[in-house]
Image (cartoon, rainbow, N blue to C red):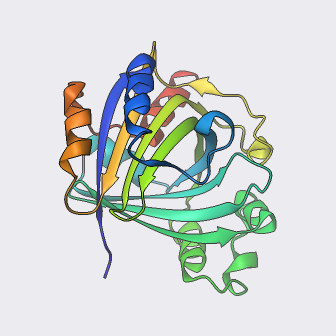
Amino acid sequence: MREYRNEWKYCCTEGELALLSARVKNLLSVDDYALSEDTYGIHSIYFDDYKNTCANDNAMGAERRYKWRIRYYSGPKKSLHLELKHKKFGRTHKESCPLTKKELAFILDRQPEEILWKTKYNLLRKFCYAIMTRNFQPKAIIYYERIAYVDQIANIRITLDKNISASKDFDRFITGDYQKIPIQEGNKQVLEVKFNQILPSYIRDIVNSHGFKQTSFSKYYLGRKKLEELV
């Protein structure tokens, strides 16, 4: 049975993120992925089918939707993962499995049959079927810088994302030197609060004290819109 988590999103300025970070860092631990200055980069290719179902479901605010993506974090290892993210009535669930650079190349070259019968991961096999039957293709690279704080015991995660950008330079995805086009104007950044059932009052009070308004912000959908404007 899938376990879904709450994922509350807020738009705010970089200054507000800095102030929030200063308060939260005294209460929670820094994420293990963090490099210098507690910040790390996230690189993701998002895929969509021949009907653009994932983007359209976001636009319509569908209560049940999903996204396929391939992701790695900045750093020396660049460990790739395939992820399937489900959303159901505002709560999320993520499935993940490792991916090799060779498998990534087959996916980008539209050769999923080279992976289908060799992989031991059901999730990767499922994605190969999606490519073959629904013509899933890479649609956008989304990149951003993240500061993340966690409470391992309560399973709470607070992420502060800035400098969100989009690209279609898929051949340069793994090197990270692709063109990055900002998807938001001005000083807009994103705060996400992720938890299972109940958000402790000390975290809720910090978020509420800034007067942030909850939003259904989608980096993938806004990235697609920005890239379409440039065509």
Q: Please tell me how many numbered marks the rendered image carries.
A: 0
* Image location (x, y in percent) of residue 73: 66, 50
Q: Nearer the viewer, residue 201 or 227?
A: 201
Q: Is residue 217 above or below residue 231?
A: below
Quarter of the image where the N terminus is located: bottom left
Horizontal relation, residue 1 to residue 99: left or right:
left
* Image location (x, y in percent) of residue 84: 48, 64
Horizontal relation, residue 22 to residue 39: left or right:
left
**Hey, which quadrant is residue 114 in on the image?**
bottom right
Q: Nearer the viewer, residue 95 or 134?
A: 95
Q: Nearer the viewer, residue 99 or 158?
A: 158
Q: Which residue lies at the image location 22% right of the left edge and 55% below the top edge?
A: 63
Horizontal relation, residue 65 to residue 48: left or right:
left
Q: Which residue lies at the image location 47% right of the left edge and 42% below the top edge?
A: 220
Residue 231 visible within the image: no
Q: Which residue lies at the image location 75% right of the left edge and 40% below the top edge?
A: 176
Q: Which residue lies at the image location 61% right of the left edge and 24% below the top edge?
A: 181
Q: Looking at this rendering, what residue extends furthest in the top direction?
A: 186
